[in-house]
């Protein structure tokens, strides 16, 4: 079934002969949607915009969809949906995309032999959420974790491993020991040459160095995987930079032959319009770099998965890198896919400086998640002291991890944000615990009613189940129903703008509207058919809340 926005947009477009530019009304007093497309056309045709809007309205056939549209301001058209139409639409709260695309999502990408720190969390959490939303909308999504498992640091790591390794320390905390080895070698000028030799040997395929290199990757991946398991994040592929080593020389040769790359100061470079610094694809010592690898990666992905779109999620510091890589790809590959670099700002401490521990070190992700769970346990225990400890811990896990993720996802990703435990764990406000608690409250209605709630199935899998009958009479019922309807368009906007904060804001509003409904409309005390209708609204709200949180990578809980 087409959505309300599809139906209205199509009708306006037909009458206007130009895009409707429909968006939700800023103030519900004026209606549910507003079409903004009239003004541009009126200007073009030198017509009065309000008169043109009236003409468009006269041609619209939206019987059964909305009330008679009204003209507002300088030619806006406002639409108010009919309760019957809303009720009918609610039988299918989410429609899959009509145009499924193949999307490769590249996010997380931590570096081997280094701890994942809090800076990596944003890429992982934002990327994971975007992947979930895209999949849910019906796209074919391939996630690939481009880990940093190659590069000059391995010269120092291998030298350190051979000469300075402490096996006890390595067994206790492998990454800490690897970081120590790297720092130790890096700090000594007189070890530079030996480290370089180890790197050359690795690059030439020396068996011993390859074994050490593999071991270092293995140890790192164990740590990454433990973190991903805690976060509930998984990848379809973890190819990593080293996977592309065999292709790099060919990439450089091809780009040179095609005249896309040229020599400059002994290095092979691609100069991109508007940028003084070139993308170096082969250094003067013959080595390849991060950019060369990314070029080979695009080619591999195109040939293997034929994506329509590749999305990279990294912090804003890599903007120039991706600009150069994308520009090169567009000159190089025939029919290149769409390429998007999705950036995000830093996480700041309450002092507004980049988040650090009290002793000035980078905050480690694992420690941050431990603290989140501990603090959540305190909150849960205050609220529910009588629950058994194991249950409280389980709840605290969902709440703590959920709070960290939500705090991140609910920010406009392009700005820096201030990390605050108290804010993210608050039970009132735009937080994960608040939404998780809203879900628990709806569950308790069903417990009282003595019925299990069943999540409405997705329309495509619903089979023969009858559409729910809804009687939307109280204004708060209508408001809630409309909010549920907006789930679909919210998901589309979230993916189109790569902004999970559209979804968090939506769920927050949903919880608010549910609360108003629940304060105003008795559910279990009402007589039929109102009772069933209201239970259906509760069920739909619960479904959207659970599904929405799931798309943010956040678990719901049954009690709190
Ligand atoms: N390892 C990189 C870093 O830590 C991120 C990788 C991003 N993906 C890519 N294809 N370059 O900055």
Image: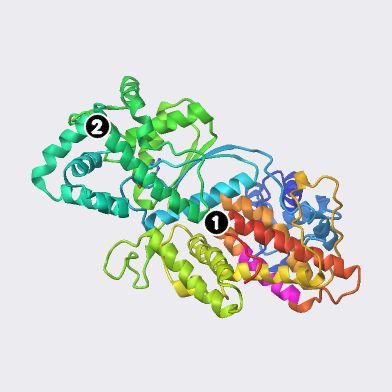
Q: Is residue 540 left or right of residue 508?
A: right
Q: Secondary structure at mark 1?
A: helix
Q: Is residue 556 magenta?
A: no
Q: Position of residue 56 (x, y in %)?
A: 76, 52
Q: Is residue 279 above or below residue 510?
A: above
Q: Is residue 247 above or below residue 360?
A: above
Q: Residues within 10 Å of mark 2 (few under 14, many from 20)?
A: few
* Residue at mark 2 to residue at mark 1: CA–CA distance: 46 Å
- Nearer the observer: mark 2 or 1; the answer is 2
Q: Ligand 1: which quarter?
A: top left
Residue at figure coordinates x 54%, y 56% from the top left:
500
Q: Is mark 1 within 8 Å of ligand 1?
A: no
Q: Position of residue 459 (x, y in %)?
A: 76, 47
In this orientation, which residue lies closer to the viewer: 153 or 423? Answer: 153
Q: Residue furthest top?
A: 257
Q: Main secondary structure of the magenta part?
A: helix
Residue, disc 2: 208
Q: Is residue 363 left or right of residue 91?
A: left
**Residue 549 in sight here:** yes
In this orientation, which residue lies closer to the viewer: 167 or 194? Answer: 167
Q: Residue furthest front?
A: 168
Q: Position of residue 222 (x, y in %)?
A: 40, 47
**What segment is highlighted magenta in the picture?**
507-518
> Residue 137 has which mark?
none
Residue at figure coordinates x 85%, y 50% from the top left:
465
Q: Is residue 258 above or below residue 240?
A: above
Residue, disc 1: 500
**Residue 279 in sight here:** no
């Amino acid at each position: 079934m087409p959505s309300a926005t599809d139906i209205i947009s199509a009708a306006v477009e037909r009458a206007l002969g130009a895009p409707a530019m429909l968006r939700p009304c800023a103030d519900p007093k004026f209606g549910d949607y507003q079409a903004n497309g009239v003004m541009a056309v009126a200007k073009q045709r030198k017509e009065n915009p309000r008169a043109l809007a009236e003409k468009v309205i006269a041609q619209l056939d939206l019987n059964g969809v909305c009330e008679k549209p009204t003209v507002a301001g300088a030619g806006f058209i406002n639409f108010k949906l009919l309760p019957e139409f809303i009720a009918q639409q609610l039988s299918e709260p989410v429609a899959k995309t009509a145009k499924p695309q193949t999307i490769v999502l590249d996010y997380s990408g931590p570096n081997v032999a280094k701890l994942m720190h809090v800076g990596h969390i944003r890429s992982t959490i934002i990327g994971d959420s975007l992947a979930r939303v895209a999949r849910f909308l019906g796209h074919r999504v391939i996630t690939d974790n481009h880990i940093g498992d190659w590069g000059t640091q391995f010269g120092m790591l291998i030298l350190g491993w051979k000469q300075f390794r402490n096996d006890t320390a390595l067994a206790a905390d492998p990454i800490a020991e690897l970081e120590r080895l790297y720092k130790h070698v890096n700090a000594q000028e007189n070890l530079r040459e030996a480290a370089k030799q180890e790197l050359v040997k690795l690059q030439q395929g020396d068996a011993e160095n390859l074994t050490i290199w593999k071991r270092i990757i293995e140890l790192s991946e164990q740590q990454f995987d433990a973190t991903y398991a805690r976060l509930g994040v998984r990848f379809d592929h973890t190819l990593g930079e080293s996977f592309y080593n065999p292709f790099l020389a060919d990439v450089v040769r091809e780009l040179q032959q095609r005249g896309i790359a040229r020599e400059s100061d002994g290095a092979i470079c691609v100069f991109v319009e508007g940028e003084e610094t070139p993308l170096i694809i082969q250094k003067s010592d013959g080595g390849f770099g991060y950019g060369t690898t990314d070029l080979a990666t695009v080619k591999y992905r195109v040939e293997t998965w034929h994506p329509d779109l590749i999305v990279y999620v990294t912090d804003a510091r890599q903007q120039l890198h991706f600009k150069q890589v994308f520009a090169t790809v567009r000159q190089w590959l025939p029919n290149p896919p769409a390429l998007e670099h999705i950036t995000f700002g830093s996480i700041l401490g309450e002092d507004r400086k980049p988040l650090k521990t009290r002793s000035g070190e980078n905050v480690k992700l694992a420690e941050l998640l431990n603290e989140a769970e501990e603090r959540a346990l305190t909150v849960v225990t205050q609220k529910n002291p009588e629950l058994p400890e194991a249950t409280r811990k389980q709840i605290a896990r969902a709440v703590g991890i959920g709070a960290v993720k939500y705090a991140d996802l609910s920010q406009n990703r392009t700005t820096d944000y201030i990390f605050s435990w108290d804010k993210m764990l608050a039970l009132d406000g735009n937080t994960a615990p608040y939404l998780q608690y809203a879900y628990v409250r709806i569950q308790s209605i069903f417990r009282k009613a003595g019925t299990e709630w069943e999540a409405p199935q997705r329309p495509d899998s619903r089979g023969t189940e009858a559409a729910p009958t809804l009687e939307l009479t109280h204004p708060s019922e209508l408001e809630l129903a409309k909010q549920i309807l907006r789930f679909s368009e919210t998901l589309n906007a979230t993916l189109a703008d790569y902004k999970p904060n559209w979804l968090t804001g939506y769920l927050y509003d949903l919880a608010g509207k549910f609360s108003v409904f629940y304060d105003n409309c008795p559910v279990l005390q009402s007589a039929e058919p109102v009772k069933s209708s209201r239970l259906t609204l509760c069920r739909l709200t619960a479904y959207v809340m659970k599904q929405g949180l799931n798309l943010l990578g956040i678990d719901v809980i049954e009690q709190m």
